[in-house]
Amino acid sequence: MAVISYLTKIQFDFGAIKLLADEMKALGIKRPLIVTDKGLVKTGILDTIRANIPNEFDVSVFDGTPENPTEAATWEALNIYKENGCDGIIAVGGGSSMDLAKGVRLLATHEGPLAQYAMVEGGVARIRPDVSKLIAVATTSGTGSEVGRGAVIVLEDGRKLALVSPYLIPNVAINDPELTLGLPPVLTAGTGMDAITHCIETFLSLAVNPPADGISLEGLRLASRSIETAVKDGSNRQARWDMMMGSMMGAMSFQKGLGAVHALSHPLGAVKGLRLHHGTLNAVFLPAVLRFNKSVVGDKYPRVAQAMGLPENTDIADAISKLNAKIGIPASLREMGVTDDVLDGIAVAATKDHAHPTNPRTPSVAEYRKLLDEAMAGN
Ligand SMILES: [Fe+2]
């Protein structure tokens, strides 16, 4: 059975942010809540966004999005939304702000708590179409959440779970690579590897969706050819365009489902006190998971190698390790500050993650524990 769905309106180009006011009018948004984070306010990007919103709009701002979005912060943002009589949301940022904004649009019309809407709790069927309007303005190239159905949020009980529904896909995505020109190398590398992981994991997923396969391979081609340049020279416009397109395409295709890399990085990213970057974690897990999946993927690894511009017989796990080293990704989880005491819990949590069932080879708890050991040691 194949379920294939593509509907998102995307404004993609340098200068696309100039279309924000038109898109707000088209959606009937007059009193938007901007959902963003303090880091982005400091970079001046929020000022750029506001300069593109005429005075006739009554704008409120929530800039308290945490590094990993939480349910508590979602409620805080919702309070501002309600106090100011907002009628729509503009998410400005990377995955955290966009995912938090999806939580706010849901709670604007649905009763809490958020846990009941988590995919693993059977929440998909509880999310109705009457969520509030959302325009997503991407400022990183990695998550692709601007075209995604999911919001990954750390719930009150500490679990980092995905809320998934076609009704959570933003009404409009604005992808303006200009907004990413100032993204520092460390974030360009981490978010870029998130995009590359999306393209690879979704291509390997067992779900039947050939259009998504084609999109993921083209996204992988664009991101692979430009990630090193984007990290080395952030002002390279072609590289920034490629990275943003690769990121967006990775997310358009991951309706097929992701895999063991994300099943591991979701719970590890939720560990309090560590504050681990999602894309960087994926980059560190990816070689070990590629080796684990190798026996069940048929002819797919040569096709991945080809999309990456490498000879078809390339060991792609090694190629990813080398790429990681070139762009400054840490060599191991240990180097990122992960300690052995959390690993048993992460191995169990990975088997319950929504990305687990679509990995081409189903890892047991013991196999996840081994993958964690490999990633702790480094590749
Ligand atoms: Fe991701």
Image: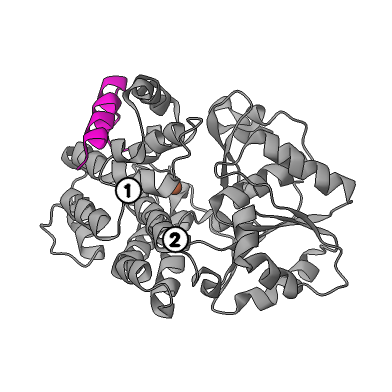
Describe residue 271's horizontal placement relative to residue 49 as left or right.
Answer: left
Is residue 155 located in the magenta-colored stretch of the structure? no
Q: Is residue 128 visible?
A: no
Residue 323's spot in the image, x, y percent?
24, 58
Does the CB distance between marks 1 and 2 fall below 8 Å? no
Residue type of the residue flagged with mark 1: Ala
Viewer-nearest residue: 98 or 378:
378
User: Magenta span: helix, strand or loop, mainly?
Assistant: helix
Q: What is the number of callouts on the image?
A: 2
Residue 10's spot in the image, x, y percent?
58, 68
Q: On the image, numbered disc 1 is attached to which residue?
A: 283
Viewer-nearest residue: 21 or 281:
281
Describe residue 336's horizontal placement relative to residue 14 as left or right.
Answer: left
Q: Residue at x 77, y 69 (%)?
A: 26
Q: On the image, numbered disc 2 is attached to which residue?
A: 247
Q: SS for tag 1?
A: helix
Where 369 sits versus 76, above or below? above
Q: Residue at x 33, y 70 (%)?
A: 232
Q: What segment is highlighted magenta in the picture?
A: 359-379
Residue type of the residue flagged with mark 2: Ser
